[in-house]
Image (spheres, rainbow, N blue to C red):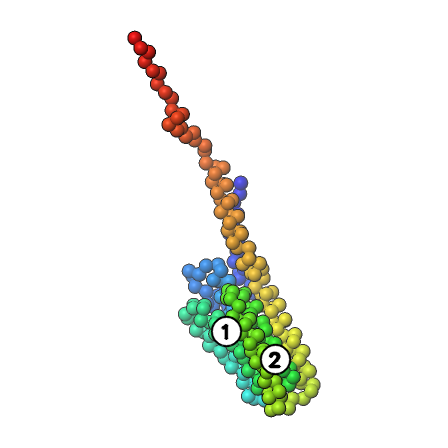
Amino acid sequence: MVCEARGVPWTDRLPPWLERLAVVGVDADDSEDDRLDKAMLTLVAGLLAVMAFAWVAIYLAVGLPQSAAIPFVYQLAVVASLVGFARTKQFGVIRTVQLVLMLVLPFALQWSLGGFANGSAVAAWAGITPVLAYLFGARGGVWLLSFVLLLAGSAAVETTLAAHAPHIDSGVRSALWVMNLGGPSIAAFLAVSATGPAPLWRRSTASSRQNRTVLNSCCSTSSRPRSRVSSGTDAPRSPKASPT
């Protein structure tokens, strides 16, 4: 019987420049699960930071530098956190920082633009935070609850924000509606595509390890020569002396 060989890590199948980014925070002593979480976080944060250039350019072009500063701050925060991550390898800190940024900044940007309507629902980007938190290993529901609370709070102050909304051309708003509704789905798709079969690998890890344990046990059992173990009751008895 041939036992299963250990597979090649999924990051080895990425393009070289993406692989270098994926392993920026990986430590030599990390488990496969830790390597997966770290790689997915750095890849997704890098992807979102690159996509943010479009929003920075648009808001600058329509004369809203304060709103443009919010996605720009996110870009700077991603660069700074990845530099720190490469030095410290502390995953818990960067995961919390990145998830807070992904959750709060889209709402802050929408508030600066005057609410849902004038801001073209840019807070929809925060909706992928609970999903990303799950992929990054944060299994609690705190991120989903936080998103719901921010969403409800934004709805509560919509009228107040709309009264002080800056002017944005209707054509620009329409384009931003398309970007803000389609962008999160595109970003999620690209993130999963970049990581390949990683989520499936994560779900099947426990079962694969259990199967390998059973398989190895079977291999060792089948190759072990059987030996007869005699008990006290099976030991040969010496004949009793006959009475004279």
Foreground: 1 or 34?
34
Q: Residue furthest top?
A: 244
Relative side of 204 to 25, left or right: right
The residue to which callout 1 is attached is 98
Question: Can you give x and y, in whole percent of width and height, for residue 12 in the image?
Answer: 53, 60
The answer to whether any part of residue 196 appears in the image is: yes
Relative side of 201 to 243, left or right: right
User: Is the residue 118 above or below the residue 213 in the image?
Assistant: below
Relative side of 90 to 171, left or right: left
Quarter occupied by residue 53: bottom right
Dot 2: element: helix
Question: Can you give x and y, in whole percent of width and height, for residue 127 in the image?
Answer: 59, 73
Query: Which of marks 2 and 1 precedes in the sequence?
Result: 1
Q: Residue at x 55, y 55 (%)?
A: 204
The residue to which callout 2 is attached is 122
Relative side of 175 to 230, left or right: right
Q: CA distance from mark 1 to mark 2?
A: 18 Å
Quarter occupied by residue 172: bottom right
